[in-house]
Image: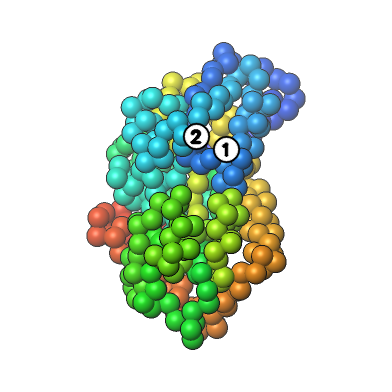
Amino acid sequence: MKIRSLKTAGMAVVAALALGGPLAAAETTLRAITAFQPGTTFAKPFEDFVSKVNAKGEGVLKIEVIGGPEAMPPFEIGNALRNGIVDIANTTAVFHASLVPEGVAMTLATRPMSELRENGGYALMNQLHEDKARIHWLGRLTQGINYHIYLNEAPEGGKLDGLKLRSVPVYQAFFKDLGATPMQTAPGEVYTALERGVIDGYGWPSIGVFDLGWQDKTGARVNPGFYQVETGLYLSLKTWESLSEEQQAFLEGLMIETESSSSLVQDLAEAEKAKQIEAGIEMIDLDADAATEFGALAQESGWKPILATSPEHGAKLRELFAD
């Protein structure tokens, strides 16, 4: 893997653009796909990134979004990147965990991207993506956005064991260790499942509930949250290697700039919490001891499958990614 200073290169190119200096590259158009429905909460950071690239990279680089989940199922995006069918994707490593199982570690991260770029965590995760799937990880679009357990009604005595919770693989082990029963339910079926009592609740980020209309069947949210939502930008390694150093540095510079302003997404989480309360969703706040136990269990449950699948890399990733 060729190591060079991302910050230095990125800042130099962004500065050149700001001053109107030319870059030695013909304009390249990257074909992009997004795993998230356009206009929704998790699509917005990507849409903002595309706008910045197309505004600042005129004559150098542009991104053309060719579709969303209606054009390509999210779990097929990893293979599309590996095979060079698309150039760049707004997705999550959870969707291509079959190719890079270690990628789930990004959801378990407790350290910010600025630290991971300094301590080698970013370099190791990117190397795993390049070696295993011929995918280049450009960076992270969301940071500090937790998942929560949402329920159709507040549980008696605050107990979570015995509940049927809509789950996804990344936190299925955690729900089991809590004593709940994880249920595989497609997002489009969650509303009806809540209405009919097929599930008692669901795992979902602190933002995005209103995008799907689930607030109508949600009576409570458990705090604190757990894990971190990971959405990011991934390129076909073939495409990445075909770009000039100037084009690569331009993308890296904008990515680092985006990561440094990720608090804007966290502001959305605070605003949505207020909106959820206004909609009648009760906040169930665990006491200090229970919250600590809850967080520790989430981490232990989450890292177990990664360590089992990839003992060597899993241990190193945990050391670099989590406190």
Which residue is disc 2 drawn over? 68
* Tag 2 near tag 1, CB within 8 Å: yes
- Residue shown at 33% from the left, 33% from the top: 79
Q: Quadrant of residue 255?
A: top right
Rendering coords of residue 141 (x, y %): 56, 45
Marks 2 and 1, the one that precedes in the sequence:
1
Nearest the viewer among 80 and 53 is: 80
Nearest the viewer among 319 and 85 is: 85
Rendering coords of residue 288 (x, y %): 54, 82
Rendering coords of residue 70 (x, y %): 46, 34
Left or right? Give the position of 17 relative to 239. Answer: right
Q: CA distance from mark 2 to mark 1?
A: 7 Å
**Mark 2 Cα shell of 10 Å, populated few (<14), some (14-19), many (≥20):** some
**Mark 1 Cα shell of 10 Å, populated few (<14), some (14-19), many (≥20):** some
- Residue shown at 35% from the left, 62% from the top: 183
Q: Quadrant of residue 128?
A: top left
Q: How is the image coloured?
A: rainbow
Q: Secondary structure at mark 2?
A: loop
Q: Amino acid at mark 2?
A: Gly
Q: Quadrant of residue 87?
A: top left
Which residue is disc 1 drawn over? 38
Residue 89 versus residue 211 in the image, above or below: above
Q: Is residue 301 at least partly visible in the picture?
A: no
